Image: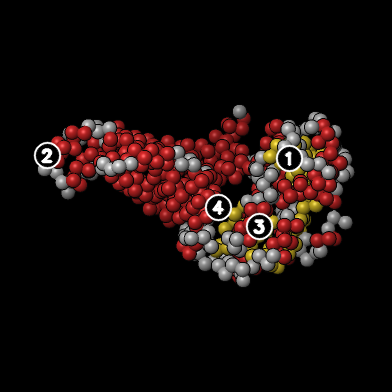
Amino acid sequence: MDLILEGIKKAFYLLFTFDPEVIGITFLSLKVSGIATLISLFIGISAGVTVALSRFIGKRIVVSLINTGMGLPPVVVGLFVTIFLWRNGPLGFLEILYTPTAMIIAQAIIATPIVTGITLAAIQQLPQKLQLQILALGATRLQMVWILIKEARLPLLAGVMAGFGGVISEVGASIMVGGNIKGYSRVLTTATVMETSRGNFDIAIALGIILLLLAYFINLILTQIQQRERPR
Amino acid sequence: MKKWNKSQVILSLIFGLFIMSGFVVPVQGVQKAIILATTTSTQDSGLLDVLIPIFEKKTGYFVKTIAVGSGQAMAMGQKGEADVLLVHSPAAEKKIVAEGYGINRRIIMHNDFIIVGPPGDSAKIKGIKLASEAFKKIASAQALFLSRSDKSGTHVKEMDIWKAAGIKPEGEKWYQQTGLGMGQILSVAAEKKGYTLADRGTYLALKKNLGFDILVEGDAILLNIYHVVEVNPSKWPKVNAGGGKAFADFMVSKETQEIIKTFGVDKFGSPLFFPDAGKKEEKLGK
């Protein structure tokens, strides 16, 4: 119990003294996971809406694949991204292994199926007749998609939170493709793992608390957006 | 112009934060980057946190330290995915040098392995001189033993000792294969009251949390020697040979050796590593 109190004390100490290393690590976590989530939103919402609104043979198989992808194990993603990005691997010429860019790629791959799956479900649960109604009022197809997305805002924002929550808390892929390099690719989760193995449990707890606070504030903002009054 | 509503303001604030955070983390030049593949003990003990900033300041290179077990570090070297290795698994090092993947293998430092276990010491190994004798006793007492099982330098050493003891521990109930790093396995062993083989540096760095005793030490087989090996650029043209050599040269330099000599003394009361540059491996521990 003392250890946890010690950790909490340390967390506030590190935060309020603006410990440059901890601040750097926190911002990098936010940046990597934030950009990865933005990328996954772009791909995931487009893909989710496309699959939801089209009819084709084997749609159920595609949907089940997307739903499986929502549980994509981060270490498996990390392993494959590492192999592809090796100097002598297929994408080695990019020279981005052990960089924050590689972490963004891995995290975007993890978050995309989550966003896609939730988008798919969100669009599908809208009443079928809504589409017809919108089109009948003279909207173009693109306008219709936009209205549907706005209509499904609540579950879609839940998708954003799930995607962001999935990647900011993820450690397996980040440590494999980022390398946990001090001052460069060390994020909150990988730093927590390292400090734990160094036996610095107080710092590890402090980093954990900062991670929780960060996740909480991001979700608080997203919830504000999600729960505000719908414009009439 | 339409007035911004609350959510747009918040969203643009978040976006601004992302852009700003880009300036907090400086982007490093790629061609000056060196990939150093090393063992967990050099990172977990904190030694590299001291040495690498000095090296970077001196040479302008940017070191990407990838701390894995020695086994994985050497696999990275063999694939040309690292530029220089700092490892402690002599037999395997000699092998990759012989195969031409590694060049210029130089001795850096040593410390020693120790056998640690719970204070109760149910296998009664405390004070035994020979590590293999101690392992025999652990086996016959069927006392819990935790193994790294990750082809790290420590794991290779552990297997050597089992071999010397003439015991095949795999599959035995009291022998648990974890796949954890050095720091983690010490915590696990302390928690489960099991025995394990550890390097003294990591043990000393973690000692305050463990409540663990050194039971066996000083046997010649327990010597733990660290070498740098440069990755051969003629096998892998993409290797940053200049950077790898610069780091290896730095590790054997007089200044670095001096730092290694005193590293940890202020914190743990005794040094974690003993510098050995220029010495012959065979002469150590005698």
CA separation, marks 1 and 2? 72 Å
Q: Tag on residue A136?
A: 2
The residue positioned 30% from the left and 46% from the top of the image is: A46
Chain to which mark 4 belongs = A
In the image, what residue occupies the spot 77% across and 52% down? B224
> Do marks 3 and 1 both belong to one polypeptide chain?
yes
Whole-percent x, y for residue B167 in the image = 81, 41
* Residue labelled with disc 3: B74
Marks 1 and 4, how far apart in space?
Answer: 31 Å
Is B182 drawn above or below residue B66 in the view shown? above
Q: Amino acid at mark 3?
A: Met
Which amino acid type is marked by label 2? Ala
Determine the image quadrant of residue A166. Answer: top left
Nearest the camera: B105 or A135?
Answer: A135
Residue at far left of view:
A137
Residue B170's label in the rendered image is 1
Inter-mark Cα distance, 2 to 4: 54 Å
Closer to the eye: label 1 or 2? 1
The quadrant of the rendering that contains the C terminus of chain B is bottom right
Residue B67, how many percent across, how many down?
62, 52
Q: Earlier in the sequence, mark 2 or mark 4?
A: 2
Q: Dot 3 lies on which element?
A: helix
Q: Nearer the viewer, residue A192 or A11?
A: A192
SS for callout 4? loop
CA gap, disc 3 to disc 2? Answer: 66 Å
Q: Chain of mark 1?
A: B
Query: Where residue A35 sits: x, y (%)?
Result: 39, 49
- Residues at marks 4 and 3, CA–CA distance in whole angstroms: 16 Å
